[in-house]
Image (tube, helix red, strand yellow):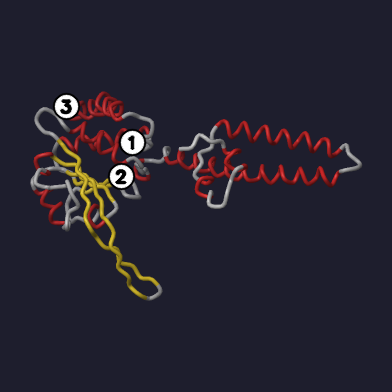
């Protein structure tokens, strides 16, 4: 991420800098720059209003300053709306929540579920797959790289070689993991392999590349229950929270709560 101010980016903008401008994250310095530039405009406006001669030349300067302020204002407003949307997402109920950092979620669930008796592992599976769609009355098929992450018992994943791109991935390969008696969690860019498995006890969290849980009566299912309770009470925004802090918080508050309920 560039440390260059929005003001300097706009002043030195060249053809082809569109992405650089649009991807800039608004900072406090940018807001101060905007305030100072507006103060310059307001001061010149006051001078203009007291003038009789030379108004046209000053008006041209006012127009240039306003154009620049409009550019900054648009980008600042865009950032404000994006931030509002981000924090509004954090206020949603569990059914409407979406975990953007799904790999961190998998790491948290892995650590919550693993203990002295059983270890869980995350594996990344890449493979060629195809996307078919209708365009202008014709069906087209395009190949792309499917990528899914799977969390399950380490022993059940041992036969799955993920060190290289698989030549093919079939649903049966994932179903077989579940049929060995372990819960598993899937997330990725191929919903056919994550959301459309014909398996029982399916739950989801999120709406875009959701975490898909296929649960059984084991430690991972207990971890999922505690994790979802955390999300329900605290929101799905996991940014800026360390994985180890999330694990300790959920263990100390939500897993203990679940254990207490089972004892009652």
Q: Residues within 10 Å of mark 3 (few under 14, many from 20)?
A: few
Q: Is residue 52 left or right of residue 172?
A: right
Residue shown at the point (45%, 38%) measured from the top left: 1
**Mark 2 falls on what kind of element?**
strand
Which quadrant holds residue 41?
Answer: top right
Q: Do tag 1 and tag 2 residues touch (Cβ < 8 Å)?
A: yes
Which quadrant holds residue 99?
Answer: top left
* Residue 161 image position (x, y, % from top left): 13, 47
Which residue matches tag 1?
A: 231
Q: 189 or 93: nearer the eye?
A: 189
* Residue 218 image position (x, y, % from top left): 14, 37
Which residue matches tag 2?
A: 205
Residue shown at the point (30%, 48%) measured from the top left: 210
Q: Residues within 10 Å of mark 2 (few under 14, many from 20)?
A: many
Nearer to us: label 1 or label 3: 1
Which quadrant holds residue 240?
Answer: top left
Q: Is residue 173 above or below residue 82?
A: below
**Mark 3 falls on what kind of element?**
helix
**Mark 1 falls on what kind of element?**
helix
Which residue matches tag 3?
A: 263
């Amino acid at each position: 991420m560039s440390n260059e101010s929005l003001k300097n980016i706009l002043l030195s903008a060249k053809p082809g800098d569109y992405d650089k401008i649009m991807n800039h994250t608004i900072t406090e310095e940018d807001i101060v720059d905007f305030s100072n530039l507006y103060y310059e405009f307001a001061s010149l406006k006051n001078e203009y209003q007291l003038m009789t001669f030379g108004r046209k030349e000053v008006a041209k300067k006012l127009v240039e300053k306003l154009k620049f302020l409009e550019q900054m204002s648009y980008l600042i407003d865009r950032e404000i709306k994006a931030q509002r949307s981000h924090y509004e997402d954090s206020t949603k109920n569990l059914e409407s929540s979406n975990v953007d950092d799904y790999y961190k979620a998998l790491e948290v669930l892995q650590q919550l579920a693993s203990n002295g008796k059983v270890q869980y592992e995350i594996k990344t599976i890449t493979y060629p797959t195809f996307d078919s769609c209708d365009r202008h009355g014709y069906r087209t098929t395009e190949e792309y790289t499917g990528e899914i992450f799977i969390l399950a018992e380490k022993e059940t994943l041992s036969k799955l070689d993920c060190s290289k791109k698989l030549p093919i991935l079939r649903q049966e390969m994932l179903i077989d993991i579940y049929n060995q008696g372990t819960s598993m969690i899937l997330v990725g860019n191929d919903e056919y392999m994550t959301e459309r498995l014909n398996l029982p006890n399916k739950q989801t969290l999120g709406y875009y590349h959701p975490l898909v849980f296929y649960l059984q009566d084991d430690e991972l299912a207990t971890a999922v229950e505690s994790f979802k309770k955390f999300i329900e009470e605290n929101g799905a925004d996991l940014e800026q929270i360390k994985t180890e802090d999330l694990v300790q918080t959920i263990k100390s508050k939500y897993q203990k709560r679940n254990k207490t309920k089972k004892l009652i």
